[in-house]
Amino acid sequence: MNDEEIKNEIRKFALQNAAEHEGQTRDKTILAKIMGNVSELRQKAKEITPIITEIVSEINQIPLEKQQKEIQEKYPELLETKKEKPQKENTLPALKNIEGKEIVTRFPPAPNGYPHIGHAKAAIISEEYAKMHNGKIILRFEDTNPGTERLEYYAAIKVGMDWLGIKYSSVEYVSDSLDILYKKADQIIKSHDAYVCTCSQDSISKDRREMIECGCSKQGVEENEKLWHKMFDEKGFKEGQALLRFRGNMQSGNTTMRDPALFRINTKRHARQEQKYKVWPTYDFAGIIFDSISKVSHAMRTKEFELRKELHHTILDKLGMEKAEFIFFGRLNLEGMPVSKSALKPLIENGKVPWYDDPRLPTLEGLRRRGIRPEAVKKFVLSLGLTKNDTVSPFASLEAFNKKIIDGESVRLHMVRDPKELKITNLPSTEFQLSNHPTIDLGKRTVNVNDSVMIEGDDAQELKKGESIRLLGIGIVKVIEDGSDLAAEYISGNTENIEKKIQWVSGEPIKIKIIVPDQLFFGDKFNENSLKEIEGFVEQAYLELKDGDEIQFIRFGYCRKESTHQVIFTHK
């Protein structure tokens, strides 16, 4: 796209949004729309932000009727029946080698942390491929690392998958079937393809770096079987004293082939099995065996596992087991939001963030609490396609998908901060009907107004004597006194040619706390002001909404009602 085409796209979105919101729009809203709808501009957020700011500022100065006229003349397609052209949401490439196969995929999390948007990507892609071919997806807990796994993590993963709407056909726990893995280990020892190593970890690492054969690899089958059984004996090897290693190729350029560990001793308490087992499989053994046993046809993995493909295929060949088709993809990161467990955990431990449901985090609980819908997460993930490149996406891209979903369901309400009284004379009525949505029939609400309303402190400060403004839902009033004794006179219900539009509350508004999350990091620097609390006053209709309902506070943004006196800001 050239510069003129970019400006035209921005202007189109800005006009459309302004026309739908009483003639006003915001630059962040338009940035989110561009990120969500114009794929080739997603990597150019910084370059186009100043252009958006300039165009939005210009459009906000144009009266509503002129905005609508420009839309009719230049962008008539925006006036067609609001059946949006379906956005290309599923850009997954076709599966290979599927002739005559039942398509079975799996999502195999380790229950050692709370699920985040990276887990969502893996689960969504795996389920989508299964759905595309009338197949099924398995939820498998790869719980083979005692000491790191907790029951709350199992539960959190299940809750997260249910929230995303992942319809798994069955749930597997690797720790429930260790006997199967022990038998496979017996088989690979008997074929002289594995050996027990009693070297120190330092010695093993040194040999692997220098591509030197371990002396333990010279042991015969009988000796290895004896040492293997000793690993299980309570009076035998202790933790760290012995490993079962695969006999790979110590001269291989692929470091994963240099006699990796298949089993190790771990005596820590297991979340589900407690102290039942002492010898535990590594990822390199457990996952691929269960893929084969469960007849997984296609295994989706992040690209860092691509190097292990040779090792995994070699192990399965030695065991004479079927191999799944491997599909690799890049990691998903959100700008300024840490995604990995290793990055999230220190934030909690150091008190930077109170818990994993904090709305600043990309955990599924954090996103849910913020008001991000699971359908938006799914559409966002699928819009990125399947690529091995790691993705660092601005949060605005996810916001754009979310806004499309929540906009039509979000009741519009008035909320003011730092309220100041505005006295009004000559009001034609003490009751006014306000629409709950500007374009969709979500009903109306009746608001009583006597001789004054409360407006935002910033708006009050800017009002000048003699100025005409539009009080949303009431009409045009003319300021007759400014300063500390604000007063206005009602003029008419006519809304033409009035640029300044102000929301208000009357009677006894409800005091609420608005939690406003912001970007956690700018580069490597933690943003100490990433969570703000704002005091707001909202109209009485707020009390009729249920906890969890989405609201749009006019001229502020979308918020999710969390309790009677608290909302969380979702996005503009």
Image (cartoon, grey):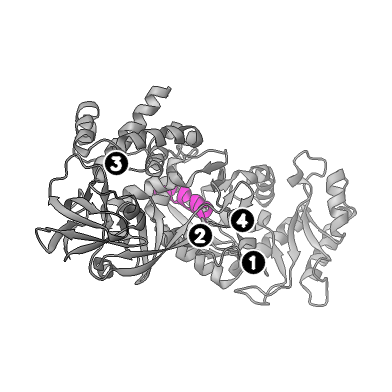
Number of the front mark, 4 or 1: 1
Dots 3 and 2: beta carbons under 8 Å?
Answer: no
In the picture of the structure, the residue carrying the numbered disc 4 is 287
Query: Which disc, if any, is residue 446?
Result: none
In the picture of the structure, the residue carrying the numbered disc 2 is 531
**Up-down relation of residue 5 to residue 134 (above or below):** above
Q: Give whichever of discs 1 and 2 has the lower sequence position.
A: 1
Residue 420 drawn in magenta: no
Q: Give whichever of discs 1 and 3 has the lower sequence position.
A: 3
Q: Which residues are magenta?
A: 115-131
Dots 1 and 3: beta carbons under 8 Å?
Answer: no
In the picture of the structure, the residue carrying the numbered disc 3 is 17
The residue closer to the viewer here, 158 or 554, is 554
| Amino acid type shown at disc 2 | Leu
Q: Is residue 165 visible?
A: no
Q: Give whichever of discs 3 and 4 has the lower sequence position.
A: 3
Q: Residue furthest left?
A: 428
Question: Residue at the spot x=33%, y=32% of the render?
Answer: 11
Q: Is residue 39 visible?
A: yes
| Amino acid type shown at disc 4 | Gly
Q: Give whichever of discs 3 and 2 has the lower sequence position.
A: 3
Element assignment for label 4:
helix
